[in-house]
Image (spheres, rainbow, N blue to C red):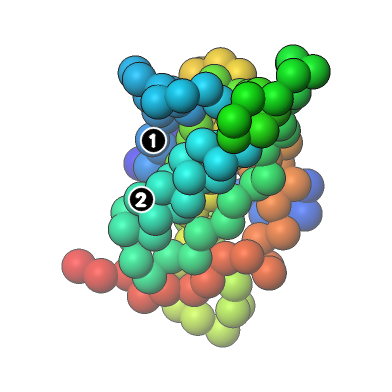
Amino acid sequence: MSLARVVLTCGRTVDLAELHLTPTYGTRLDGYPCRPVNDLRIRTLRHTAERMSPATPVHLVPPPRDYPDQYAGAQGPVEILPRVACAARLSSRPLNPSRDPLRYHSTLTVIWFQPTPPLPDPDTPPPALHHLDWAVLARDVEVRD
């Protein structure tokens, strides 16, 4: 059973099989939010997502970056990412229609950022999920017992 079901703009239905929400900056931030800190956070999230399911490809939706200050510190200007970092493993029917849907499914892990922590709503999914190019990004994998 999935956490939610989302219909992509291409018409494909995908199931939200697993979802991890974390604060973008954790409980402690060394220094201030800037591009080097944010890039490190994104790399760490990608690495964590790759370990969630090693056979599943990972796609990062480029996050919006906000620059609220006009002054730069030692690491450059203040750069803020949305508050919540999300990593979700999605699954759907196989990409290859000749594959047995009982033995195969297509899968993709997606990382995105959002301002609030609610689960994606099937009626209004976040654009990060809604506009995925599933045929290009996902991969068919064999279901393991």
> Which residue occupies the foreground of this view, 25 or 84?
25
Identify the amino acid type marked 2: Thr
Is 99 situated left or right of 136 in this image?
left
Residue 68, image x, y percentages: 74, 16
Asked whether disc 2 touches disc 1, contact meaning CB atoms under 8 Å apart, the reply is: yes
* Identity of the residue furthest to the left in this view: 145
> Which residue occupies the foreground of this view, 139 or 61?
61
Tell me which residue sits at (51%, 59%) in the image.
58
> Which residue occupies the foreground of this view, 50 or 119?
50
Q: Nearer the viewer, mark 2 or mark 1?
A: 2
Q: Secondary structure at mark 1?
A: strand
Q: Secondary structure at mark 2?
A: helix
Question: Relative to 25, does residue 2 appear above or below in the rendering?
Answer: below
Distance from label 2 to label 1 (Cα)?
10 Å
Check disc 1: other Cα within 10 Å, few if <14, some if 14-19, many if 20+: few
Give the residue pinned by disc 2: 48
Name the quadrant of the C terminus.
bottom left
Name the quadrant of the N terminus.
top left
Tell me which residue sits at (41%, 47%) in the image.
44
Residue 100, image x, y percentages: 45, 77
Tell me which residue sits at (59%, 51%) in the image.
60
Residue 22, image x, y percentages: 40, 28
Give the residue pinned by disc 1: 20
